Image (cartoon, helix red, strand yellow):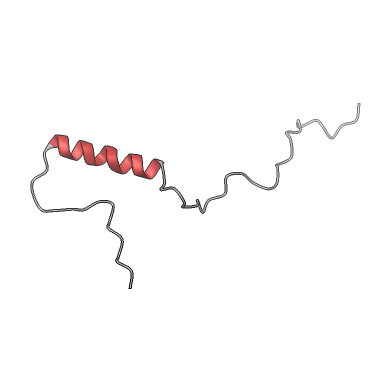
Amino acid sequence: MPASPTPPIRVERGQATDEELAALTVLLLTRAAHPAPGTESTSPGTTSWRPHPFHAPHSWQRA
């Protein structure tokens, strides 16, 4: 049986200083902004259809 993967972040007991909390915040925001390699995003990047271009309110009138 393969060994379970090590979690990327380990939380321990203790009193975090302001600097440690700031470092943790930076770490979590960085990891959220850049997903791990090999993982695919579930949200689509673009739509497969394009909305109709803007038509002015008087565009139904013929010149």
The residue located at (91%, 26%) in the rendering is 63
Residue 15 at x, y percent in the picture: 8, 46
Image quarter hosting the N terminus: bottom left
Q: Is residue 38 above or below residue 29?
A: below
Is 28 left, or right, of 14 in this rendering? right
Measuring from the top left, give residue 9's x and y in whole percent.
25, 51
Query: Is 54 situated above or below 41?
Result: above
Quadrant in the picture for residue 27? top left
Q: Residue furthest front?
A: 1
Foreground residue, 23 or 2? Answer: 2
Quadrant of the rendered image containing residue 23: top left
Q: Residue at x 41, y 46 (%)?
A: 35
Q: Nearer the viewer, residue 45 or 55?
A: 45
- Left/right placement of residue 21 relative to residue 38 reads left
Q: Residue furthest top?
A: 63
Q: Residue furthest right?
A: 63
Q: 3 and 12: which one is in front? A: 3
Tell me where residue 54 appears, x and y as whole percent: 73, 33
Q: How many marks?
A: 0
Residue extending farthest bottom: 1
Instruction: Please give left or right for residue 41 compared with residue 22 in the image.
Output: right
What residue do we see at 57% from left, 49% from top?
44
Left or right of 22? Residue 3 is right
